[in-house]
Image: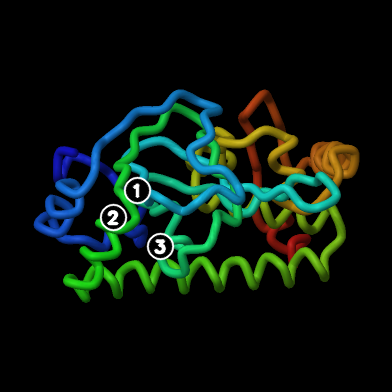
Amino acid sequence: MTVGAERYVPGSFLDRLSPHELSALAALGVTRRFPPRTILMLQREPADRVMSILSGRVKASRTEADGREVLLSVRDPGDVLGELGLVDGAPRVATVTTLEAVEALVLPTGAFRTYLETTPRVAVALLEVVTRRFRETTELRSQLAAADTLGRIAARIVELCERYGREHAGGTEVALPISQEDLAAWAGASRTGTTQALQTMRELGWIATERRRMFIPRLEPLRQRAR
């Protein structure tokens, strides 16, 4: 890993570390590259490694008892994966799959845990990340319980715009990192319900869609509908 060469998402785990801390972390593991649609971690497998994303994006999803896939989150460069197993040693609670070509730092769980025990500032940085994720998960669960399908889809589109949107004359353009099926799983909606919600938004003039690309003339109607 070439320290200082990466561009991490602000506030992510690696973004919080100093160049010296990044170098020390890189020395504990190995950098690997993975093609799109590669499973990096599998639900219920032993938590034997931790990974930090250097480039590319992944999705974390969980298969429920009834066979439904629930998309828990999309993770970006600088994010850490497998941190829960690091803390409690329990099997994985989710499957992590690459959405595009990904480069990641792979570290043995034991080595990473020892490093955290001897480097309190880095341990605090990880704690801050875990706390933020817990808040996001709590807010998402509340939203899923309270909103209808249209509102849930609107909320996910707003989040995608805030994370990946590029401002253009007349609106915001988003190159979507996820498929329509992923969007449905993220919003806790059926595929049919998601298709109908997107069609309604197109008819209202809130969005225009192409394959893996979306244009939003104005975000405010979506924000209002997401509440």
Marked residue nearer the N-terminal end (1 or 2): 2
Q: Quadrant of the C terminus?
A: bottom right
- Residue at x 17% of width, y 72% of height: 118
The mark that comes first in sequence, 3 or 1, is 1
- Find disc 1 in the rendering and name its residue: 52
Identify the residue at image location x=81%, y=43%. 201
Which residue is most to the left?
20
Q: Specify whether 129 is left or right of 93.
A: left
Q: Closer to us: mark 3 or mark 1? A: 3
112 or 45, which lies in front? 45
Q: Position of residue 35 (x, y in %)?
A: 45, 23
Please state the horizontal and vertical placement of residue 103, each as a whole percent of the image: 34, 34
* Residue 54 relative to residue 102: left or right: left
Image: 121 above or below 114? below
Q: Report the residue marked by disc 2.
A: 14
Percent x, y of residue 205: 78, 41
Q: Residue at x 69, y 57 (%)?
A: 155
Three-letter code, disc 2: Leu
Measured in 3D between alpha carbons, the distance from the residue under mark 1 to the one under mark 2, in whole angstroms, is 8 Å
Q: Quadrant of residue 105?
A: top left
Q: How is the image coloured?
A: rainbow
Q: Which kind of residue does numbered mark 3 sit on?
A: Leu
Can residue 203 be seen in this snapshot? no
Report the Cα–Cα distance between label 3 and label 2: 17 Å
Q: Secondary structure at mark 3?
A: helix
User: Where does residue 210 sit, x and y in percent of width and height?
Assistant: 68, 25
Residue occupied by mark 3: 86
* Residue 120 sits in quarter: bottom left
Residue placed most toward the observer, 137 or 61: 61
